[in-house]
Amino acid sequence: MTPRPVTPAADVHAVLAAPMRRRLLAHLASVGSSLDVHELAAEVGLHTSTVRFHLETLRSAGLVERTEVSGVARQDAVGRPRTGYAVARPVRSEADYEELARRLVAGLGDTPDARDARAEGVGAAWGRELAATATPDEAPVLADVAVRRTVQMLDELGFRPAELDDPGPGIRIALHGCPFRAVARDNPEVCALHRGLLTATLESMGSPLTGRLLPLVEPELCMVHLDAAG
């Protein structure tokens, strides 16, 4: 069963932060017409169910819309219009995305504490959604599986993670990229959202590890620490 996509409004940051969704959106914009799931899956090299999930998430945020595509895509679709997806509004630049993120952060609450708590809750909901789409493993998972899946998730979201050879306790993962680092420098709520994402992802897989996010330990570097629970 395909998971229900991320809901609109408060989760728009999560929608825009995923590189695959930006890639699908950019491809639809470059084509300038409606494409069906099979055409888009062939373009990005993913399974149709995964692509459909990303498209429905984009649609929930009002970024794409469903359409009817004329013509025949497959032999079993002779004479039937097929469902396609097209851009619902002009695709913005990265600077526009960052401005949108700033405005969304400002609307999370009237105080820094309220914004922080709300953002962490949004991130946790995002983490649970991502966990639901992952290849299922029996829970709880072993520590090495938890590390692998966490690194994979961070990589897919554009954080450019690199596991460090650290002689200290636990696992240290350097994050060399962040889709909204420029916004996060002035809006720590963005980091709270990513903190909630990390925590919920580990909890959803029944991980024996807990995670800590250390934002901007250097101007272009954040860190994740994974340690044994308890």
Image (cartoon, rainbow, N blue to C red):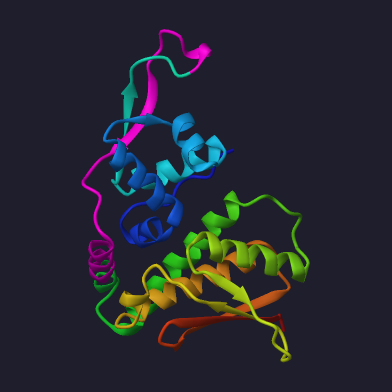
- In which image quadrant can residue 128 be found? bottom right
Residue 135 at what x, y percent from top left? 67, 50
Residue 76 among those drawn in magenta:
yes
Q: Nearer the viewer, residue 121 or 35?
A: 35
- Is 208 placed left or right of 42 in the picture? right
- Picture mark count: 0
As drawn, is 202 to the left or to the right of 34? Answer: right
Q: Residue furthest bottom?
A: 168
Residue 120, image x and y in percent?
44, 73
Residue at (47, 13) in percent of width and height: 77
Q: Residue at x 33, y 17 (%)?
A: 70
Which span is picked out in magenta?
A: 74-103
Asked whether 47 falls inside the magenta stretch, the response is no
For residue 203, above or below residue 30: below
Residue 58 x/y as whole percent = 37, 46
Quarter in which the C terminus is drawn? bottom right
Relative side of 148 to 36, left or right: right
Q: Note whether 56 is above or below 101 in the view shown.
A: above
